[in-house]
Image (cartoon, helix red, strand yellow):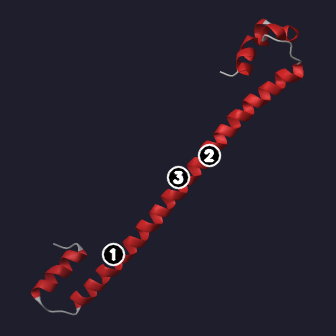
Amino acid sequence: MSDFEKAFSKLSKFSLENHTELWGEPKTERAFFEAGQASKQAEIDGLQLKNAELARIMLDKNREIVKQAMQIDELQKRVDAALSICNTSSFPLITWIDRALRGEE
């Protein structure tokens, strides 16, 4: 918990004029709110870092998906070529391979 958050949680017990008790040293109202702003900015900066990391992870996953899709396309081309050969042959083994590639029993 930041100094600001500690002080803010105690704020209900003290008036802003007694901020010396909250902070341990005299501070102006402006300093009090600047400390709050700095605390929130630190939170924002942390969230921006997390967001950037998640964006990088998402980009890596997208690249992986595209690579897998390209591999699937290449395998499909090979299967189509094998089916084309099977369709032009009359050997029993080729007929069996043709049926297996089509998913038939």
Mark 3: few, some, or many residues within 10 Å (few <14, many ≥20)? few
Q: Amino acid at mark 1?
A: Leu
Between disc 3 and disc 1, the foreground one is 3
Q: Which mark is residue 42?
A: none
Name, please, the residue furthest toward the front.
Answer: 25
Which residue occupies the foreground of this view, 94 or 72?
A: 72
Where is residue 92? Give x, y as percent: 10, 86
**Relative side of 15 to 96, left or right:** right
Q: Amino acid at mark 2?
A: Asn
Where is residue 3? Give x, y as percent: 72, 19
Q: CA distance from mark 2 to mark 1?
A: 36 Å
Q: CA distance from mark 3 to mark 2?
A: 10 Å
First in residue order: circle 3 vs circle 2:
2
Residue at 88 percent across and 9 percent down: it is: 17
Quadrant in the picture for the C terminus: bottom left
The answer to whether residue 95 is above or below residue 72 is below
| Residue beneath disc 1 | 75
Q: Quadrant of residue 70?
A: bottom left
| Residue beneath disc 2 | 51
Which SS class for mark 2?
A: helix
First in residue order: circle 2 vs circle 1:
2
Q: Are marks 3 and 1 in contact (CB under 8 Å)?
A: no
| Residue beneath disc 3 | 57
Mark 1: few, some, or many residues within 10 Å (few <14, many ≥20)? few
The answer to whether residue 16 is above or below residue 60 is above
Q: Amino acid at mark 3?
A: Ile
